[in-house]
Every structure is written in C-alpha cells, then in structure tokens.
Amino acid sequence: QVQVVQSGPEVKKPGASVKVSCQTSGYTFSDYHIHWVRQAPGQGLEWMGIFQTHGDRRTTYAQKFKGRLTLTQDTSTRTVYMDLGSLTYDDTALYFCARDGHGGSPFSFDSWGQGTLVTVSS
Amino acid sequence: QSALTQPASVSGSPGQSITISCTGTNTDVGNYNLVSWYQQHPGKAPKLMIYEVTKGPSGVSNRFSGSKSGNTASLTISGLQAEDEADYYCCSYAGGDSWLFGGGTKLTVL
C-alpha cells in the first residue's frame, strides 16, 4: 500500500536552514507529484510548494516562500526533500508532505506523511 | 493570494446534517472545479474526503458530499456521527501550479 514517511523533529536557530525528507513506497514514484504543506501551532494548513517528479521535474513555490524554499528529489531512494532557509520564529510548524492524487483524485492530496515538527528557537 | 474563507466553527447533533462553506474568488474556487476537502483529527495528518468539488475517494463514507456555486464551495455531512468531530479544510487549485487552503472549520458534534 502507499506509504509516505517523513524524517524526525528538528530544532533550529533563527537564520538557519532545515531539510526535511519525505520517503515514499507502494506506488510508481515518478507517476505522482509531491506537495509540501505546513501547519503552525493551533493554525490552519498552508500550501508551500510542489515538486513534479516526472517530466521536466518543475518546482512551483507559494509566493511567500520564494527565495528560501527548495524542493529536490532522490529517485534512487524515492525521496523528496524540503529545504527551508533563513528560518524565523514564525516558521515553527508541523511540516507535511503529501502525494498529489494525479489520475485517481487529481489536483488533491491523497496520501500524507505523518508530519515533521520544526521548532525555531534560540 | 489570501486564504479561502471558512466559518471558524459549526456544530450539530448526532443524526443531523451540517454544511461548511468555503468562499474564494473568480481566480480560484470560481475558476476551476478543483476544490477538495480534508478532515483532520487532533494530532493527525489530514485525510482527503472530497476532490473535484463533488467526488468521494474510495473508502470515504457517502455521508460526505460536496457542491459549488460561483465562488463558494460547500461540504455537507449528513447523519452526523461523533467521529465526524474534527477540523475541516477546503483547498482549491489557483492556477499556475499553485493551491490555496481555507482557514479551517472546527466541527463540534453536540
């Protein structure tokens, strides 16, 4: 079955960068894009960006993250990485990766990772 | 882009029906039939409940249904059950390979 497993919690200082991994299994990796979504404590969901795992492997980032968000992949391990730089206290949040539904449920997020807590603290 | 607008909270008694609205603009909700809805229980990852405005994924109860009129999409839950108590989020494709979430609605089953 489809599985999406993320790396463990991180604690970072302001100004640092964090890299979170999202490893997938149970399906053909290149058939489904991967999104990143975050949720600040007690707040709602916020779409951050998409990594298109096939074709030109294009990335698209939400405007507020442009310049400090980078999504990459390692096809050999079926993993997509999220690298967020210039961290501030406002970046403290639970970060989720989610598979795009593609042919089954297009333009939606059909399988989610368990979430990775990133805490920004001095 | 601003988040889609949802009511902060709704409530209903077991067996009743409730509807959660999700208002966007003519560049997102109104421009695409690509609204999805997610259920999130505390401490859990979101779960897809509706996609493409009205379609339910396999395994999701048919008590959940979706609709859209103009710039507003809606999620209706019929035959409310205790386990439906959760946060619900709408999401719309907004063009240019970008997506937009609503602020979320807390559903309380009385």
Image: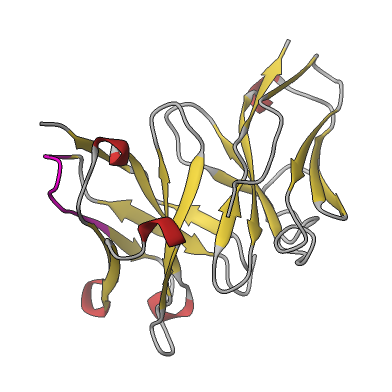
Residue A117, how many percent across, how many down?
A: 27, 38
Q: Residue furthest right?
A: B69
Is any part of residue B99 visible from this angle? yes
Q: Is residue A16 magenta?
A: yes
Considering only vertical position in the picture, is B83 above or below B91? Answer: above
Residue A89, how many percent across, how many down?
A: 25, 35
Q: Is residue A36 magenta?
A: no
Q: Is residue A76 left or right of residue B104?
A: left
Considering only vertical position in the picture, is B103 above or below A52? Answer: above
User: In the image shown, does A3 or B42 lie closer to the viewer?
Assistant: B42
Q: Which residue corresponds to the image point at 81% horizontal and 48% vertical from the top-left?
A: B72
Extent of the magenta region: A11-21
Residue B1, how many percent across, how many down?
A: 58, 55
User: In the image shown, does A117 or A40 lie closer to the viewer?
Assistant: A40
Is any part of residue A2 visible from this angle? no
Considering only vertical position in the picture, is B33 above or below A74? Answer: above
